[in-house]
Amino acid sequence: MADPMRIRAQASGDKATVRVLMSHEMESGQRRDANGKLVPAWHIAEVTAEHNGKVVMTAEWGPAVAKNPYLQFSVKGAKAGDKIAISWKDNRGDTRRDEATVS
Amino acid sequence: MQNRRETLRQSAVVAGLLASTGLFPQWAHAAFNKAAFETKTVLDAVKAYGPGSITESKDVTITGPDIAENGAVVPIGASTTLPGVKQLLLLVEKNPSTLVAMFNVTDSIDATIATRAKMGQSSDVFAVAIMADGRALFAKKEIKVTLGGCGG
């Protein structure tokens, strides 16, 4: 199981800005190890964002997203106290889901 | 409507392509559009999501630095003010695989997304907005990289 994500959701006006830092190696699949063998790609492939249980965004990522990925977006109509949940699944089938409250 | 012959022919073509690039799938996801992440040009990546052509548009913006010190972490963002956006794509033209990330945008969020990408070398970076009516609009920006992020 991967380390927890850091999620910060801040309401301003009629929307909330969500910033997420995920903890993941995001191996590109281009690198070679000491023996000259390619290190296989290992990356987050699918990301889902929910606002109070409703899916507001999904994403597909390739290995070119940087290590320990950062993601920022804003949810319309989200206010203080609302729940924001982020979940991801990597190409090895590992998953992680974390929740945060809008402040 | 596709008949069986067409389906077979297309899968043979795809399998051939995958085998020739040495990227035969070790894993498969129902939702993950793997083919799109293996394309080598901006247009091919967009085509994997439907539209057949792309047009430059002032209504789409790409944000990023002019010079990235470290290609392993390049902050880039895509946004558009147009209504009816279905998907936002971020692409780095000269990466081994062009497509970096695809976001399915709903009405509940602003069509503004920021993340960080890896870049192997200086390249044009594209933001593509695929609209509900099937158009694909893009904006591009050149980002110079002093230290590549793909060779480790």
Image (cartoon, rainbow, N blue to C red):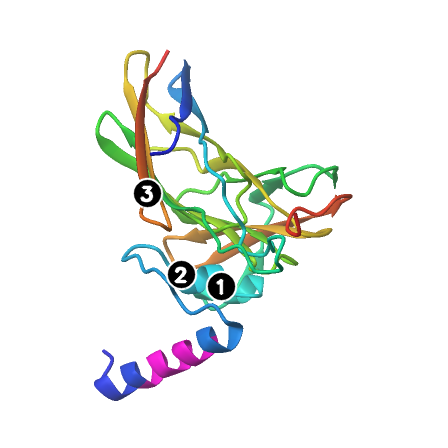
Q: Mark 2 lies on which chain?
A: B
Q: In which quarter of the image is residue B29?
A: bottom left
Marks 3 and 1, how far apart at CA: 21 Å
Image spot of residue B31 (x, y percent): 30, 55
Q: Mark 2 points at which residue?
A: B34
Q: Residues within 10 Å of mark 2 (few under 14, many from 20)?
A: some
Pointers 1 and 2 within a single chain: yes
Image spot of residue A39 (x, y percent): 53, 54
Vertical order, B51 against B91 (above or below)? below
Magenta residues, dominant SS class: helix
Q: Mark 1 points at which residue?
A: B38
Query: Which structural element holds mark 2?
Result: helix
Q: Does the magenta stretch include residue B11?
A: yes
Q: Mark 3 points at which residue?
A: A94
Q: Does the magenta stretch include residue B116?
A: no
Query: Which structural element holds mark 3?
Result: loop
Q: Nearer the viewer, mark 2 or mark 3?
A: 3
Q: Are circles 3 and 1 on residues that touch, CB within 8 Å?
A: no
Q: Which amino acid does label 1 sit on?
A: Glu
Q: Which chain carries label 1?
A: B
Q: Nearer the viewer, mark 3 or mark 1?
A: 3
Marks 1 and 2, how far apart at CA: 7 Å
Image quadrant holding the N terminus of chain A, namely top left
Image spot of residue B99 (x, y percent): 52, 55
Q: In which quarter of the image is residue B24?
A: bottom left
Q: Which amino acid does label 3 sit on?
A: Asp
